Amino acid sequence: MRDFRFAASGGSRKVQMRFKQPRLATASFGFLTAALLSLSLDVHGAWAAEPLFDELRFGASASINGNDTHESGIFPSATIYFDPLSSGDAATWQQSILEPRIYLGASVGTGDGVDQAYAGLAWTANLTDKLFVELGLGGTVHNGDLNDDGTQGPKLGCRFLFREQIAVGYRVTENWQVLATADHSSHANLCDGPNNGLTHAGLAIGYKF
C-alpha cells in the first residue's frame, strides 16, 4: 500500500488531499484528479488571464475486446490538455498539424479491468463550428498481465504500450463539449510475449478554458 499526498493553494484557498491505493494507475488517477480540482480553484481569479491548461476532460468507457480478452466493468478517466503551441489559433489545417496539444491522463479499471496512466499529442480538426474530430497518439503504462497465466483478460506482453485515441465531439457551448471516444493500446509486436491489446469505447465531457 502506497501513501500519496497532494497540497496546492490558489489565491486564498488551500486544498490538501490524501490517497491510499494499491494500484498504479488508480493512484495516478486520484493524484491527477486532485491536481485538476486544485488548479481549477482560482481559474477565474489570478490565473484567469492565462490558464495553466487548455481543457479538463472526464469520461467513462467500457472494453470492446472480444472473448477471453474482454475486461469487465467500466473505466472512469480524467485527462488534462495543454496547448503550449496555441493550436486553437491555427488558421489552416497545415498549421493544426504542426501545433498539437499535449495531454496527460489516467483511467481506472473496475471489475477485472486494467489501470492505465497515459500521455501523448492530440490534433483537432473542425468539421463545422460545433462538430469536430480529434486524434491522439502517445503511450501508456499499465498494471495488466504481461503473459498468459491461465486467467481471463488481456495479456499484454510489455508494461509500456503505444496508445491511440480518437474522438468525435460536439461543442454545446463555447466552453462545454461532449465526445464519443475510443482508444487502443498495444506494443505493435515490438516486444516478446502476447499482444492482445486494450480497446475501449465510451463518452466524455470536456471543459475548455
Image (cartoon, rainbow, N blue to C red):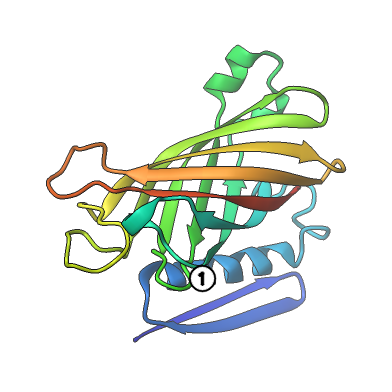
Question: Where is mark 1, residue-wise?
Answer: 31
User: Where is 201 relative to 142, above or below?
Assistant: above
Provide residue 13's location: percent of width, then percent of height: 74, 77
Dot 1, how many residues are within 10 Å of its Cα: few (below 14), some (14-19), or many (20+)?
some
Image position of 87 with respect to 111: above or below: above
Give whichever of 67, 44 is nearer the camera.
Answer: 67
| Count of numbered labels shown in the rendering | 1
Can you name the residue that lies furthest to the left here?
Answer: 192
User: In what element is the residue under mark 1?
Assistant: helix
The image quadrant where one finds the N terminus is bottom left
Residue drawn 48% across and 66% down? 108
Residue 177 in the image, given as x and y percentages of width and height:
77, 45
Question: Where does the image place residue 123, in percent across and percent down from the top left?
Answer: 57, 30
Q: Quadrant of residue 76?
A: bottom right
Residue 103 seen by the camera: yes
Who's the residue at 61% across and 82% down the image? 16
Amino acid on which the number 1 mark rests in the picture: Phe
Q: Which residue is at 57% across, 26% downward?
A: 99
Nearer to the camera, 209 or 111: 111
Q: What is the residue that sits farthest to the right in this orientation?
A: 173
Q: Is residue 61 left or right of residue 198?
A: right
* Residue shown at the point (67%, 52%) measured from the top left: 204
Give the x, y percent position of residue 188: 26, 37
User: With respect to residue 2, does 38 lie above or below?
Assistant: above
Q: Is residue 4 left or right of residue 133?
A: left
Quarter-of-image position of residue 154: bottom left
125 with respect to 170 (left or right): left
Residue 56 visible in the displayed image: no
